[in-house]
Amino acid sequence: MIAFLAKRIGIGAITLIVASIVVFAVLEILPGDPALLMLGMNATPEALAAMREQMGLNEPVPVRYLGWIAGLLAGDFGRSFTYSSPVIDLILERVVVSLPLALIALTLSTAIAIPVGIFSAARRGRAGDTVSMGVAQLGVAVPNFWFALLLVYVFAVWLRLLPAGGFPGWGAGVWPGLKALILPAVALALPQAAILARVTRSAMLEVLGEDYIRTARAKGMPRRYVLWRHALRNAMIPVLTIMGLQFSFLLAGTIIIENVFYLPGLGRLVFQAITQRDLIVVEGVVMLLVASVVVVNLIVDILYAVVDPRLRIRA
């Protein structure tokens, strides 16, 4: 098991190094002068030169890259020129919104998808299977921002049960903060639940055709016990894979939803930093998101070994 973890950690470290090179290179080759964009077209040559010197743009590219990496390893993500604030402070302010939102959405998605997938697989070819998979197909096809607008109209405008947007901050209390995240979390969870339900159904159908499932049924085990105890556990490998990918997407890919609900999250911060050409913020946030993906994949690999003893034996 230790060798298994060491191998996965090594792969994650290599992934981070490659990702840092790609992120830094892509942002370097983008057209436009960051100093000119920040100061405006009427900026004097002296002001532009001073801004480039302050941003470190006059140094060679390898020197800037190594300095950036050294700062990341030391916990120094640099300083935003747009917000005049350390990037790490901006990230900490936004992650307290994006992380709970992603966790709530993933919890809702899992709570909906796994029972629906098991229900559909147990009734393959019947009316229940057709209806549930038809609804899941609709959920895959419809974009999440449409769900968001529909939820706002029903629960915020019509019923007036939940706020239509904005975030009061956790300092206003846990319940006001959660109320502000319920609608965006549901809007994010529904399409992901549709995808996960279809994956769960496919994995369950594959497992239900195995010999050991037929043997368990022949021994007289209750159908519910066979489904939840034997079939589900052996079908969890692809389900865990999709869940890991979904959490990474929910944490990093909520730009549209955060803009619909005016949430000050990481996605909106990246969007604003890109439009303002604040490269140091973009680099810091993207590398943090890449690191979160690596950590989530490591956790998923560990869960593989927990769910499937054969992986522990091979490791």
Image (cartoon, grey):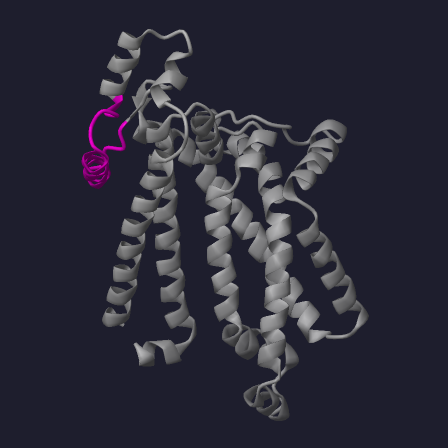
Q: Is residue 303 left or right of residue 71?
A: right
Residue at the spot 25% in from the left edge and 61% down from the top edge: 10
Residue at the spot 58% in from the left edge and 92% down from the top edge: 215
Q: Quadrant of residue 96?
A: top left
Q: Which residues are magenta?
A: 55-78
Residue at the spot 26% in from the left edge and 55% down from the top edge: 13
Q: Is residue 211 magenta?
A: no
Question: Where residue 173 appears, x then y in whole percent?
Answer: 48, 29
Residue 19 at least partly seen: yes
* Front in this rendered view, residue 159 or 18: 18
Residue 226 at least partly seen: no
Residue at the spot 22% in from the left edge and 19% down from the top edge: 53
Question: Where residue 105 appears, x then y in whole percent?
Answer: 55, 46
Q: Is residue 282 above or below residue 16?
A: above
- Quarter of the figure with the N terminus: bottom left
Q: Residue furthest right?
A: 127
* Front in this rendered view, residue 53 or 251: 53
Question: Where residue 90 appears, x then y in whole percent?
Answer: 36, 28
- Quarter of the figure with the C terminus: bottom left
Q: Quadrant of residue 220?
A: bottom right
Question: Where residue 304 appears, x then y in whole percent?
Answer: 41, 69
* Front in this rendered view, residue 75 or 41: 41
Q: Is residue 29 above or below residue 188?
A: above
Count of numbered circles in the view: 0
Q: Is residue 221 above or below residue 156?
A: below
Q: Is residue 75 magenta?
A: yes
